[in-house]
Amino acid sequence: MTLAFFESSTRTRLSFEAAAKRLGAVTLLFTPTGSSVEKGETLGETFATIEAMGVDAIVLRHGVNGIHHEMSQNTSMSIINAGEGSRAHPTQALLDASTLLERLPIRARMAPLDGYRIVIVGDIRHSRVARSNVDVFLKLGAEVALCAPPTLAPDDDTMKGLQYFDCIEDACKWAHVVNLLRIQRERITADIVPGIDEYRERYAMTTERAQRYPDIVITHPGPVSLGVETDARVLTMSQSLVHRQVTHGVAVRMAILQRLLNPPTP
Ligand code: CP
C-alpha cells in the first residue's frame, strides 16, 4: 500500500500507516517533495509507476476536488480517499460516527443515530469534513444543523435545507453533539475571517461554554487551533471525544483496508 499525501497530515497519514501495519501490509511512503513530481511528472504517470511496482492500494490526499475519481478511471489499484480538497473526507466521517456510536447511549431506534441532534460549527464553506460528516450523520439517522459566520457558511448546494444557527449559544441549546471545525486558512484567499474575539464570542466552544453545557458531546477532527474554536482545557474534559476520535481512526481504517484488500469470500 502506498501513502501519497499532497497536503499535510498527521492523523490520517499515521493512522492509515498504523492500520496497514497491524494488518500485515507493506507500506510505501510517497511524498511529492523530492519526487519526480518536482520534475513535471503527471499524477497519472506517478500512479502508473507506483502500480508497476505491484502496489494494490493507494491512500491519496489531494487538494483538487474530483481527482480521486479521475485517477480511479485509469488504474487497477484501489484508491482510498484520505481527504479531497473541500469536497470529501469520507474516512474522517466514518471514524467520527464510530466514536459517537461508542459514546451515545443506545436507544430503541430505527437508525444508529436516530434521535440525536448534531451541529457542525465553524468554517463549513471550506471543509471537506463537514461535507462528508453531513452525508454520514444523515444516513445514520441524525438531525444535522450548521453554525457558521455568514462568510464561512456553505455557498454551494451540498448542504441545502439544513437548519442554520448564527451563534453557538443557540446551537448548544439544540444539540446533543457539537462537531467543531477549524478555520481552513490554507483554502481562504479573501479577507472573510472574523476577528478572533468576535469568533470566540459567537462560534467557539470555550472552556466556560463547555462547563455550562456539560451534557454536550464535543468532537473535532483535528488539528485544533487552540484559543480559536476551542481551548486546550476543553480537550481534556470528559465531554470531549477529540482524542478518542484518533483512536477510532486506526480501527476504522483497519476495517476499510480489510474490506477492500482482503474481502470475505462469499
Ligand atoms: N483530521 C485530519 O484529517 O487530520 P490530519 O490533517 O492531521 O490528517
Image (cartoon, helix red, strand yellow):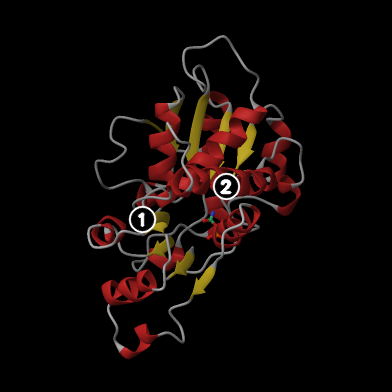
Q: How far from the left and from the top, in percent, is residue 57?
A: 42, 59
For disc 2, the neighbor class at 10 Å (few under 14, some 14 to 19, many from 20) is many
180 to 174, vertically: above or below? below
Residue displayed at 33% across by 66% down: 190
Image disc number at residue 86: 1
Q: How far from the left and from the top, in percent, is residue 59?
A: 45, 60
What's the amino acid at mark 1?
A: Ser
Q: Is tag 2's residue or tag 1's residue first in the polypeptide sequence?
A: 1
The residue that label 2 is drawn on is 254
Badge 1 marks a residue whose secondary structure is: loop
Residue displayed at 47% across by 18% down: 111
Q: How far from the left and from the top, in percent, is residue 108?
A: 57, 9
Residue displayed at 50% across by 59% down: 195
**For residue 22, side relative to residue 172 (left or right):** right
What's the amino acid at mark 2?
A: Met
Quadrant in the picture for residue 166: top left
80 to 189, vertically: above or below? above
- Taking the image as four quarters, which one is ligand 1 found in? bottom right
Instruction: Decide which of 226, 51 is in the foreground and name it.
Output: 51
Camera-side mark, 2 or 1: 2
